[in-house]
Amino acid sequence: MPTKHLLKIEDLHHSFGEEEVLKGISFSLDKGETKVIVGPSGTGKSTILNNIIRLVPPKKGKIYLEDTEITSAKKINEIRQQIGFVFQDFGLFNHLTAKGNIMIGLTKVKKMNKKEAEDLALLELDRVGLKEYADSYPSQLSGGQKQRVGIARALAMQPKLILFDEPTSSLDPELTGEVLKVMRNLAEEGMTMLVVTHEMGFARSVADELIFMEAGKIVEQGNPEKLFTDPDHQRTREFLFQLTDLYGEGEN
Amino acid sequence: MLEIFMEYYPLFLSGLGVTVFVTLISCSLGTVLGTFLALGKIYGNKLVSAVVRTIISIIRGTPLLVQLFIIYYGLPSWGINMDPITAAIISFIINSGVYQAEYLRGSIQSISGSQLKAAQSIGMTKWQGIRHIVLPQAFRRVIPSWTNEFIYMIKYSSLAYVIGARELMTEGKLIASRNYQFFDVYLVVALIYLIVIIFFVAIFNRIEKKVTIP
Ligand SMILES: Nc1ncnc2c1ncn2[C@@H]1O[C@H](COP(=O)(O)OP(=O)(O)OP(=O)(O)O)[C@@H](O)[C@H]1O
Ligand SMILES: [Mg+2]
C-alpha cells in the first residue's frame, strides 16, 4: 500500500448540462501540504472545490478524505465538518456577529456548549488578529476583516484541510496582504490547504506544488519554482507570465 | 359620539378584544403556516411544491368571504361544526398563511443561495442551514410586509360579522340596531380600528428597529 494521502482526487469529471467543465482531474494532497491551483477564468477551478465537499456533486470520479470516499459518503455533512471552505465572497452569516459566525457551527454542528464555543471563537479571532471585532457584524467589517473571520470560522471547526476559492479576489488590493499573511501563517503551522488564487507571490513562496489547469484539464503540476522558471509547457510559461504581469508578485 | 362610546364601551371593548384576539392568532399561526408553505414551495420535491402551488392558487383565487362561508356553513354538512370565532380564525389563518407564504418566499430566495452554501460548508445539514441561517434573516426582512398583512387582517376580520362572530363590527351593528344612531356608532367603530392600527403599527416598527442587523 502506498502512503495514505489526506485528500485524493481520481479522474474527476463534471459537466453542467452539455458543457463538460472538468475532463478528468487527478491529484492528491498530503498532510501539511499547500497546493495552489491557477488557471484562466471558467476553467473549472471552483467546480473542483465545490465537487470536493459536494456542494456541487461530481458527475464522475472518486474523491477520498483519508480512508473515506467522499463521493459516495452517506453523511456528507459529517465530512464537510472536516474540510474548511473559504469563499471568494466571504459567505459570512449576515445576521451574526464575527463571534456568532464562528460559534454557530460549534454549537449547532459540534454540539459544544455556549461557553466553550465562545472561548474557542475568541481564540480563533485572536489568531487572525480580530479579537476586538468579536461583536461587530459583517456589514461593519472591511473586506479583509470579513475574510479573516471567514478563515477563523473554518479554523474553529478544526478541519483536516481548508479549501480556499480565490480568497482575495473580491478585496481591494491594499487589503489582500492581511489575508495572505494569515494564510501564510497557517501554512507554516502545518495546515493542509488547497488554494485557488491569482496571487503569484503567495503561490511562489508558500505552495509546495502549483497546479496549472486550463479548459477542465491539468496542463502541468509541480514545484512552483520550476513552473515559473522552467515549465515543460509553453502554455504554462505564457499564463504565469501574464498573471505575474497582471497581479504582480503579490504581498511581499 | 363620545356619549355613545361612554354608554356602550363594555360592548365596544369586548368586540375590540375579539377583533384583536382573532387577528393576532390568525396572523401568528398564519406565519407558521406561511413558513411551511414557503419552505415546501422552495425546497420541497416536485410533488410537495406542486401541492403548495395549488393551495396557494386556490386560496388566492377565491374571495375570503366564500372561504369563510365554506368553513362555517359548508363543513357542518360533513359533520364538522364550530363556533363563529373558531371558523373565522381558521379561515383567516389559511388566507393569511397563503399571502405570508408569498412574502416569505421572496425573502427566503433573496437570502438562500450563498448563505445556505456557507452553512452547509461548515457541516450544517440543509435543514439546519434553513433554520439557523436563512430563516432568521428572512423573518427580519419580511417584517414590513408582515405589518401590512396585520393591518389588512385587522380590517378583514370585520368580515366575521357576517357569520355572527362578536367582534368589533358585530358589536357596532348590534348597538346601532338598538339606538338607530348609525352614523355615530359606525364612526366610533371606525375610530377604534384606526387607533388600534396606529398603535400596532408603532409597535411593529419598534420591533423592526430593534431586530434590524447593522
Ligand atoms: N451552476 C452552474 N451552472 C452552469 N454552469 C456553471 C455553473 N457553475 C459554473 N458553471 C460553468 O462552468 C465553468 C467552470 O466554472 P468554474 O466556476 O469552476 O470556473 P473557475 O475556474 O472557478 O473560474 P473563475 O476563475 O472565473 O472563478 C464555467 O464555464 C461556468 O460558466
Ligand atoms: Mg472560480
Image (cartoon, coloured by chain):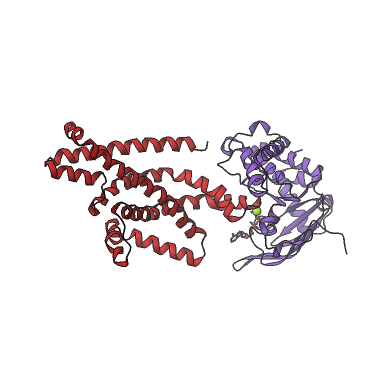
* A222 or B58: nearer the viewer: B58
Q: Quadrant of the N terminus of chain A?
A: bottom right
Does residue B47 appear left or right of residue A36 in this picture? left
Q: Position of residue B104 (x, y in %)?
A: 45, 51
Image mark count:
0
The image position of residue B69, as x and y in percent, is 27, 59
Q: Colour of chain A?
A: purple
Q: Is residue A40 above or below residue A201?
A: below
Q: Where is residue A212 shown, x and y percent of the image?
A: 75, 56
What percent of the width, then of the height, locates residue A110?
68, 48
Q: Is residue B24 above or below residue B84?
A: above
User: Quadrant where the C terminus of chain A lies?
Assistant: top right
Frontmost residue, B105 versus B130: B130
Quick check: A118 above or below A207?
above
Residue B89 visible in the shown view: yes
Which residue is painted at 30% across and 54% down in the image? Answer: B83
The tint of chain B in the picture is red
Position of B167 compared to A178: left or right? Answer: left
Q: Is residue B13 left or right of residue A150?
A: left
**At x 45% / y 57%, what residue is drawn?**
B37
Residue A165 appears in view: no
Residue at the far left: name it: B180
